[in-house]
Image (cartoon, rainbow, N blue to C red):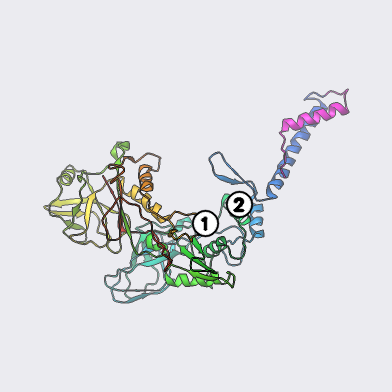
Amino acid sequence: MAVTVYTEDQLFDRAIGYFRVSFPTQDLGEDSFFGLLARAFARFFVLAQEEIYQADCDSLPAYQIDADGNPRSRCSTEALDAWAFVFGLPSGSPGIFGRRRATVSSGGLAIPGVSAAAVLLPANTQAADPTGQIIVKTVSATTLNGPPNLIPVQFVSVTTGVAANLPIGTVLSWQSPPAGLNATCTLTSALTGAKETETNAELVLRILQRIQTPPRGGTAADYRFWTETAVDSNGATLAVARAYVYPLRSGLGTVDVVPLYGGSGTGRIPPAAEITKLQTAVDLLRPVSVKLNMLAAATPKLIQIRVRATPSDAKNGTYGFDWDDGGTFVTITAHTANTLTVAAVPAALSAAFAAGAKPRLQIPLVGGGGSELPFVVTVSSIVGTVITLEQNFPATVFDGLTYFWAGGGVVLAVAQRILDYVNGLGPSRISGTADKGDAWEDQVLLERLVDIVMEAKDTDGTKMVSAMPGYGSTAAQIRIGGAAFAITAYRPLDTLVGAPELAVIRSGGIEVIR
């Protein structure tokens, strides 16, 4: 029930009113005996009211929305912990209910180097970040071929908490590498999704979700919850960041579930061994009359995205392109580890280098081992038609096919926003069988890409893009599979055969040009 709380002055006035009726001939001034007594009563009951008010707040898991729009729990920390236990919310530790503990990150990808052919990398092989404090492990056993090896390996973290969220480019050192495996590897897809111990605001919303959508023995919400909180036979979390449910997709009495990790691109899709573990875990909870199909999302067509952006003039042109490529890319005809050869070096690039501007190139590396983000690198020398770079190529370069654009301060910031958008999409809903009570985006829309580019801001809130040339036409284009770039949205398919498709950007699949 609601409790009315009075201020000290209101309580003082009520006490004086009582004394006025009971002792009409006495001095009731604020400094009199009865005035001082009324003030003492008022202060005592202010403190008592706080306890009563908190007890009222703790009597149910309630929250309020602050002026900035953020939810805030009205319950005490102790009461929330008790409510979480009462409603049986998993804590992340097997058999323990309550506040969710710090979680692991998932979705990491790397392509380990090998010095021998057919190197078996076992599941749970551990590696550490450069600090040695963050430990990650391989998700499943993988046989690496080579050299050079082009087979990616998936990682989840062993370390919990936000420190376990490792960005693209993090160098991992193997703890006990098998023979033939290079000592280090580099993340081409970030490890993401790790969180600290659940806050009161997060916990109260999880409690309310459980109250509003309680377990009903097999609703779509139940399958999502079971999958996202699944653990293996040893009690270790299976690290599913999001599960997507399709009731009756495969016929009467069936439920299809598509689980995804955090991370990026194909790193979001659990490998077959983990899909089997998830199937086993949820099979123990589902109704016996239901056939569960745990599916790995399909990615038959990887996409590329090209957007045009006019950088803002803010901060003395920090966001601008380093040179004018004239809207035309330059093809690489030959290369070494850190050089590239072209038919003719663009005059604007030569002029920028001669002026000491340290111009950057933007190279989409679509070969194995590349990130979805473009490789932005500074030119260290130009001799004839040979351009030397300050860094080695991090992925395969295809002579005659790989090309570069002008680089600049806006490129990676905008590309990262585009990557985050696509990595936030779920599998296809086009079949109409997806859970109607759980809405999610599944398609890459041109208008969303335009919004993302135009709303790109620096960490201090400064707008980085002032316009998009070709708005309504070539401002945003998508290339699907081996087709040409086109002014069309991309929606993955779900033909009810196999698994629903997931939109995934290929290596080197994002270009931010002028």
Q: Nearer the viewer, residue 340 or 437?
A: 437
Span colored in magenta? 1-27
Q: Is residue 212 among the parts visible in the rendering?
A: yes
In which quarter of the view is residue 145 placed?
Answer: bottom left
Residue type, label 2: Val
Q: Nearer the viewer, residue 328 or 320?
A: 328
Residue type, label 1: Lys
For disc 2, the marked residue is 204
Residue at image location 73% in from the left, 37% down from the top:
46
Query: Would residue 8 be counted in the magenta stretch?
Result: yes
Quadrant position of the C terminus in the picture: top left
Residue 409, given in percent of the width and then of the height, sits at 30, 45
Query: Would residue 220 be counted in the magenta stretch?
Result: no
Query: Looking at the rendered structure, which numbered label has been put on residue 436?
Result: 1
Alpha-carbon span between mark 2 and mark 1: 25 Å
Q: Nearer the viewer, residue 144 or 429?
A: 429
Where is 150 relative to 64, above or below? Answer: below
Residue 132, given in percent of the width and then of the height, sits at 41, 62
